[in-house]
């Protein structure tokens, strides 16, 4: 299923994109697309049955804002340097264990919302990423297969990053990862069974129409199942938590000087096959 949330910021309602590409209203069946939904197989089954019946009300998509596809996110966990190509382009050794950082839930924006370049920023960068949405509580998992079994679905993420804040200002990466609007999600949360193998997905990103990232999740150093297993050794993962699994080669930081960091007026578009497409205009904060 392709689940999403539509409407004004803070007043989104749940919806579904059916197999014919028709937007359907789920608000008469569920209150939100969130961890509670993903953790409840009986409710998910009712949603699937309603979708198959074709009886859900149709929504007029014209002019309707698409919000982030997951509501009430508890935490967002990022994985750094998780593609061999990205590590190579910035001259870094592939890490022996996953590199972790946290993003605040209030950095989340819709897939087509405006992204704000922070005041004083000179190195705002793009990162097209596969987002994993946890479907069941995970703690101390013993295998990558168990990790995959705890995935509820997948979504597209732009893990926007300010590289000077992240790398050159001391301390942790968090300063460069938690600026307002720095985590556009969506358009859809696609349930795990529809995605199939998460290690066989093309990831692409364009800046002002120029293709910048053209990778595949097969290049991940730590695949999705292993990432979930690993994280569960250090923190409890709850339904609705989001894991941002790293970016392929092609970020601004990896380009020759002068590096093409983002400026006000730039337009970024990104997509992962089967997970939809985003478009953001960047403006000054």
Image: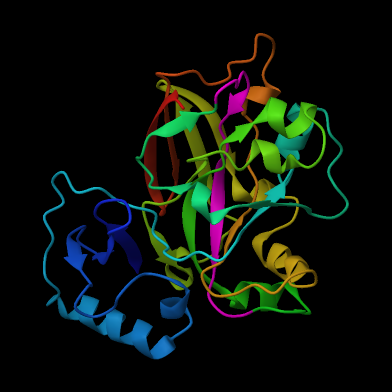
- At 44% from the left and 49% from the top, the residue drawn is 273
Residue bounds of the magenta highlight: 119-137
Place of residue 222 in the rendered image (x, y in percent of width and height, measured from the top left): 74, 56
Left or right side of 225 for 73: left
Q: Reply yes or no: does residue 125 show up in magenta.
A: yes
User: Can you tell which quarter of the image residue 27 is in?
Assistant: bottom left
Q: Residue at x 21, y 81 (%)?
A: 50
4 or 263: nearer the viewer:
263
The quadrant of the picture occupied by the N terminus is bottom left
Q: Residue at x 17, y 81 (%)?
A: 53
**Residue 71 point in image, percent of width and height:** 41, 64
**Image coords of residue 132 (percent x, y):** 56, 61
Residue at the top extreme of this rendering: 258
Identify which residue is drawn at 13% across, 60% down: 59
Is 214 included in the stretch rendered in magenta? no
Quick check: 112 above or below 119?
below
Residue 127 location, quadrant: top right
Where is residue 232 drawn, in percent x and y?
74, 72
Q: Answer with left or right where residue 260 lies relative to residue 140.
A: left
Q: Is residue 105 above or below residue 129?
A: below
Whether residue 253 sits left or right of residue 17 in the image: it is right
Classify 154 as above or below 214.
below
Q: How many marks?
A: 0
The figure's colour scheme reads: rainbow
């Amino acid at each position: 299923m392709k689940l999403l949330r539509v409407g004004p910021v803070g007043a989104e309602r749940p919806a579904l994109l059916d197999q014919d590409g028709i937007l359907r209203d789920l608000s008469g069946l569920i209150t939100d697309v969130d961890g509670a939904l993903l953790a409840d197989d009986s409710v998910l089954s009712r949603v699937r049955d309603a979708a198959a019946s074709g009886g859900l009300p149709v929504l007029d998509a014209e002019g309707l804002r698409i919000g982030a596809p997951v509501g009430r996110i508890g935490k967002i966990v990022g994985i750094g340097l998780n593609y061999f190509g990205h590590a190579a382009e910035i001259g870094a050794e592939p890490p022996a264990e996953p590199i972790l950082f946290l993003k605040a839930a209030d950095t989340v924006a819709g897939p087509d919302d405006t992204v704000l370049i922070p005041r004083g920023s000179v190195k705002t960068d793009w990162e097209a990423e596969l987002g994993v949405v946890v479907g069941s509580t995970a703690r101390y998992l013993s295998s990558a297969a168990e990790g995959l079994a705890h995935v509820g679905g997948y979504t597209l993420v732009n893990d926007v990053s300010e590289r000077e804040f992240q790398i050159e200002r001391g301390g942790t990466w968090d300063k460069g990862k938690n600026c307002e609007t720095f985590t556009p999600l969506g358009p859809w949360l696609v349930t795990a069974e529809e995605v199939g193998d998460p290690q066989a997905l093309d990831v692409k990103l364009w800046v002002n129409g120029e293709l910048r990232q053209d990778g595949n999740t097969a290049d991940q150093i730590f695949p999705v199942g292993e990432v979930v297993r690993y994280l569960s050794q250090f923190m409890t993962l709850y339904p609705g938590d989001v894991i941002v699994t790293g970016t392929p080669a092609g970020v601004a930081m990896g380009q020759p000087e002068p590096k093409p960091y983002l400026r006000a007026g730039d337009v970024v578009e990104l997509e992962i096959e089967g997970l939809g497409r985003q478009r953001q205009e960047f403006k000054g904060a």
